[in-house]
């Protein structure tokens, strides 16, 4: 038996649950054919709900009839307020994917173990303090995510998860792991960062398929002997533990590519570390290492060697043999000798970071760039500061991710730079201007916030390729995005767009960026004689323009000058897109400063818009190469009206001429001059008389003047014929 749900047929039990669910969501559940990029809705197949997404709905509970969905394959409930899961969830025998991250779950029902088809279980960021023994019944489970809970122990039955490949338990309170852990024969990735582990079980060595092992920020003092059995390991992370030594058996891990041992108490490295032929990255900063193994040069594939903050006083000559080395960090050590090997490494394109004491020994050519270690990654200081600032705004830690395609809250890095930043559904009202410090940001996801504008500085993110501002409060396109020439994906849906923006967002990205360029805020410099400031109300004019939506800042000397006036002009005029020149007797004939300002503007291709006072004629400005063509008369008698007219003129001017890109501005200006010349000719009485004669000659008694004007090709032919016959010449410069 079926019932219709908003016109879509549903089996009776599915229909009953969805109707109950509507009482909790307080809105209909949209039916979709695909929910890949959606946060809310359901997919129906043959009358059964097979995918249900309930992300970000503020749900505090789910109906007990959840178990009615007998053919449900995916259930998403990310970022709600759920404290419990209905016991009936165990009836979902077809469920393969369950995502309940970001809720308030304290425990799980025993029936969770009856989900016989479950392959992926995501329970990050809840308040779970224990797991039921029945969890071990999930024999098909391949991925289990439990980051950010309050787990102190794990059930012994966890070892029964024979299909488990990925297990994430970061940010819990685990003090030990059960011996049954060694039974996880399929486990490939294990994440145990930020727990309270004092030791690892002997059985850890039985995880023969393990290739990535995260143990950062625990209390480990040593590694078990069985650790040497993990011969498939490619990446090991042991940042921030209490290790005093590295086991000699480390040399058996022949596939190891990355070894992270920062912030421990290691005083010496075993010789066997030089046997790690596959090693590409070795991080050892913040230990108490005094010497390096003599044969460290045997690490032929080593690309990064991080040794900051140790007690190294001498470097082995074999460093010269690290032919693959790209980065060597030696800051804050006790090195007193400058070896030729460093010179040779530099010659093979290796970047070497040295501490201040070594730079005094004649080393000035190496860059000094501070790296900060944050969770499991390294960040350049400027990038780190942006993330910490955003965390204050979001009110929570922004998680890192190893997946560049991650669709949820977090950030992805490469070599110390934030590459992708996802701030979905954080209720952000604005972004800080410091966002521009993310020098290599390629992807910025801001979906589902309360943003109505973007910071002006976002235009500096020149590497950005993907920007998502959908599901926000934008009414007009943020003009600050116009320089994003590398942008290939721009998501704008579900915003309350108004006026032009409502239509423009439907256009191609180049068309959108060009529209934004025309609307973009500009910086204006007002050039005037000091003696004219009060008479011509420069302060009031500046304040008026700065209050207009398409003007970012106005600069003039009396208010903004600091230090030497020539240096002030040389620094600020090139930063502006427009120079307003108040032309008076004082500024045109007596002011050295005004002439120098015009000179600087011309040198840096800053457009000049003359404002002629009634003290002068336009001919008086010719020696400055300024004229009425791109100028305006200053109406002091009707000053308020003049301010409005001037702003409208500036808006029109910046629409026609690209004030941000100097070469394009020259082309735009030439085109505008050509148009003006042609229009002046066409509107001249001389040309009208000529056209009348031509019309009489070719009218053939039956054509009307109106129809003739529509023949644009004939118009142009006659125009150029007129120009040729009359020998009229016009100049673009």
Image (cartoon, rainbow, N blue to C red):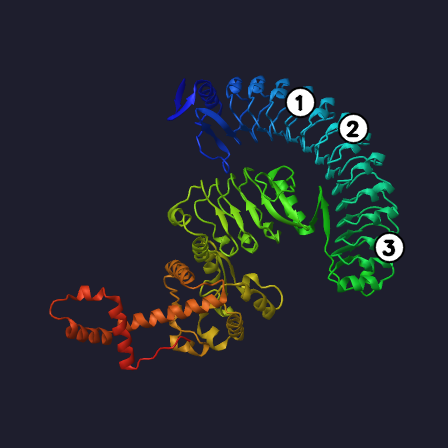
The image shows residue 201, relative to residue 529, as above or below, that is: above
Q: Which residue is mark 3?
A: 334
The mark that comes first in sequence, 3 or 1, is: 1
Q: Which mark is residue 176?
A: 2
Q: How far, Cα to Cα, is label 2 from label 1?
A: 19 Å
Q: Where does the image place residue 7, in percent across and percent down from the top left?
A: 37, 26
Question: Of discs 3 and 1, which sits in the foreground?
Answer: 1
Using the image as rendered, state which of residue 658 and residue 308 is in the foreground. 308
Question: Of discs 3 and 2, which sits in the foreground?
Answer: 2
Circle 1 sits in a helix, a strand or a loop, which is it? helix
The mark that comes first in sequence, 3 or 2, is: 2
Q: Where does the image place residue 183, in percent across and percent down from the top left?
A: 74, 27
Identify which residue is drawn at 46% across, 66% down: 664
* Disc 1 crowd, CA 10 A, few/some/many (<14, 14-19, 20+): many
Q: How far, Cα to Cα, is label 3 from label 1?
A: 53 Å
Q: Which residue is mark 1?
A: 135
Circle 3 sits in a helix, a strand or a loop, which is it? loop
The mark that comes first in sequence, 2 or 1, is: 1
Identify which residue is drawn at 58% across, 21% down: 85
Location of the C terminus (image quadrant):
bottom left
Q: Where does the image place residue 600, in percent across and percent down from the top left?
A: 54, 71
Location of the N terminus (image quadrant):
top left
Q: Which mark is residue 340?
A: none
Q: How far, Cα to Cα, is label 3 from label 2?
A: 38 Å
* Disc 2 crowd, CA 10 A, few/some/many (<14, 14-19, 20+): some
Q: Are marks 3 and 2 in contact (CB under 8 Å)?
A: no
């Amino acid at each position: 038996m079926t019932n219709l749900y908003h016109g879509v047929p549903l089996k009776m039990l599915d229909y009953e649950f969805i109707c109950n669910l509507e009482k909790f969501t307080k809105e209909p559940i949209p039916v979709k054919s695909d929910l890949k990029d959606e946060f809310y809705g359901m997919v129906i197949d043959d009358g059964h709900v097979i995918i249900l997404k309930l992300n970000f709905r503020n749900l505090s509970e789910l109906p007990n009839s959840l178990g009615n969905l007998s053919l449900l394959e995916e259930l998403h409930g990310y970022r709600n307020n759920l404290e419990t899961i209905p016991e009936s969830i165990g009836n979902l025998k077809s469920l393969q994917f369950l995502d309940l991250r970001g809720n308030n779950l304290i425990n799980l029902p025993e029936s969770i173990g009856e989900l016989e088809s479950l392959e992926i279980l995501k329970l990050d960021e809840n308040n779970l303090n224990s797991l039921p023994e029945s969890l071990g019944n999930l024999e098909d489970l391949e991925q289990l995510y439990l980051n950010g809970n309050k787990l102190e122990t794990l059930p012994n039955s966890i070892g029964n998860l024979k299909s488990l490949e990925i297990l994430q338990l970061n940010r819990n309170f685990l003090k030990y792991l059960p011996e049954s852990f060694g039974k996880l024969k399929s486990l490939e990735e294990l994440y145990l960062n930020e727990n309270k582990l004092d030791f690892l079980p002997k059985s850890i060595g039985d995880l023969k398929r393990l290739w990535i092992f995260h143990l950062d920020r625990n209390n480990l003092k040593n590694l078990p002997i069985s650790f040497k059995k993990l011969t498939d390991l490619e990446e090991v992370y042991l940042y921030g533990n209490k290790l005093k030594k590295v086991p000699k058996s480390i040399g058996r891990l022949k596939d190891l590519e990355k070894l992270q041992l920062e912030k421990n108490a290691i005083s010496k490295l075993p010789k066997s570390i030089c046997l790690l032929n596959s090693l590409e990255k070795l991080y050892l900063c913040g230990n108490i290492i005094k010497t390096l193994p003599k044969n460290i040069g045997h690490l032929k594939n080593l690309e990064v060697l991080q040794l900051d903050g140790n007690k190294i006083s001498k470097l082995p000559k074999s460093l010269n043999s690290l032919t693959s080395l790209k980065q060597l960090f030696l800051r804050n050590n006790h090195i007193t000798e400058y070896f030729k090997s460093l010179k040779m490494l530099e010659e093979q394109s290796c970047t070497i970071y040295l501490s201040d004491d070594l730079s005094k020994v004649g080393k000035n050519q190496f860059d000094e760039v501070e790296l900060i270690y944050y969770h499991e990654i390294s960040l350049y200081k400027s990038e780190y500061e942006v993330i910490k600032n955003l965390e204050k705004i979001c009110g929570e830690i922004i998680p890192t991710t190893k997946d560049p395609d991650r669709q949820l809250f977090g950030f992805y890095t490469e070599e110390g730079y934030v590459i992708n930043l996802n701030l979905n559904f954080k209720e952000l009202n604005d972004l800080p201007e410091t966002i521009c410090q993310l020098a290599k940001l390629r992807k910025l996801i801001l979906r589902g916030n309360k943003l109505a504008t973007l910071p002006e500085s976002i235009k500096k993110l020149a590497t950005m390729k993907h920007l998502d501002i959908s599901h926000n409060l934008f009414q007009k396109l943020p003009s600050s995005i116009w320089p994003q020439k590398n942008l290939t994906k721009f998501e704008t849906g579900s915003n309350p767009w108004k006026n032009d923006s409502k239509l423009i967002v439907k256009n191609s990205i180049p068309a959108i960026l060009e529209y934004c360029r025309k609307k973009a805020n500009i910086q204006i410099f007002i050039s005037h004689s000091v003696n004219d400031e009060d008479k011509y109300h420069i302060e009031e004019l500046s304040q008026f323009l700065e209050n207009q939506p398409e003007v970012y800042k106005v600069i003039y000397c009396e208010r903004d000058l600091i230090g030497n006036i020539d240096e002030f002009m040389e620094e600020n005029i090139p930063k502006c897109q427009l120079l307003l020149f108040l032309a008076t007797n004082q500024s045109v004939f007596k002011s050295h400063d005004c002439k120098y300002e015009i000179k600087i503007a011309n040198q840096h291709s800053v457009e000049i818009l003359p404002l002629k006072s009634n003290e002068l004629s336009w001919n008086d400005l010719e020696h400055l190469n300024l004229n009425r063509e791109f100028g305006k008369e200053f109406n002091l008698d009707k000053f308020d009206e003049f301010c409005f007219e001037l702003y409208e003129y500036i808006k029109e001017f910046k629409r026609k001429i690209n004030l941000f890109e100097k070469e394009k501005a020259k082309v735009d200006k030439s085109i505008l001059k050509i148009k003006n010349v042609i229009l002046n000719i066409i509107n001249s009485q001389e040309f009208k008389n000529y056209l009348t004669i031509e019309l009489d000659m070719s009218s053939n008694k039956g054509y009307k003047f109106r129809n003739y004007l529509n023949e644009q090709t004939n118009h142009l032919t006659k125009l150029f014929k007129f120009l040729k016959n009359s020998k009229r010449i016009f100049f673009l410069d």
